[in-house]
Image (cartoon, rainbow, N blue to C red):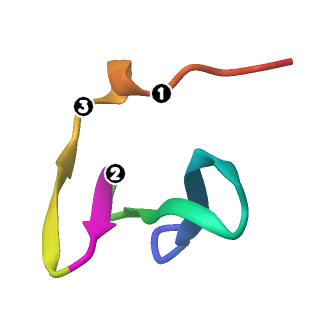
Amino acid sequence: MENSKIGLVSHMGTLTQCGHYVAYMYKRRKWVIFNEDKVGGVWPASFQLIS
């Protein structure tokens, strides 16, 4: 699936009513972060898988 996209939202804070949300998207074999008005690349090692 060459055109597949995966996205997720991450919350940083103690409660859902306060804190900060960022969005990640996997596009064209790269992870991208959307943080306020900034968009940038993400190193794969930045992610920690939880099972």
- Amino acid tagged 2: Trp
Q: Which residue is mark 1?
A: 47
The residue lying at 69 percent from left, 70 percent from top is: 17
Q: Which residue is mark 2?
A: 31
Q: Which residue is mark 3?
A: 43
Residue 7 drawn in magenta: no
Tell me the SS state at disc 1.
Answer: loop
Image x and y of residue 40, in percent: 14, 59
The residue lying at 16 percent from left, 81 percent from top is: 37
Q: Quadrant of the C terminus?
A: top right
Q: Check residue 14 in the rendering and tell me which mark sits there, or answer none.
A: none
Tag 3–tag 1 contact (CB < 8 Å): no
**Measured Cα–Cα span from mark 3 to mark 1:** 8 Å
Q: Main secondary structure of the magenta part?
A: strand
Q: What range is drawn magenta here? A: 30-36
Compared to 20, does 12 lie above or below? above
Tag 1–tag 2 contact (CB < 8 Å): yes
Instruction: State which quadrant residue 43 falls in.
Output: top left
Instruction: State which quadrant residue 16 falls in.
Output: bottom right
Sort mark 3 into few (<14), some (14-19) or many (20+) by Cα contacts within 10 Å: few
Work out whether residue 35 or residue 29 is closer to the camera in this orientation and state it.
35
Residue 34 drawn in magenta: yes
Horizontal arrangement in the rendering, residue 7 relative to residue 36 (left or right): right
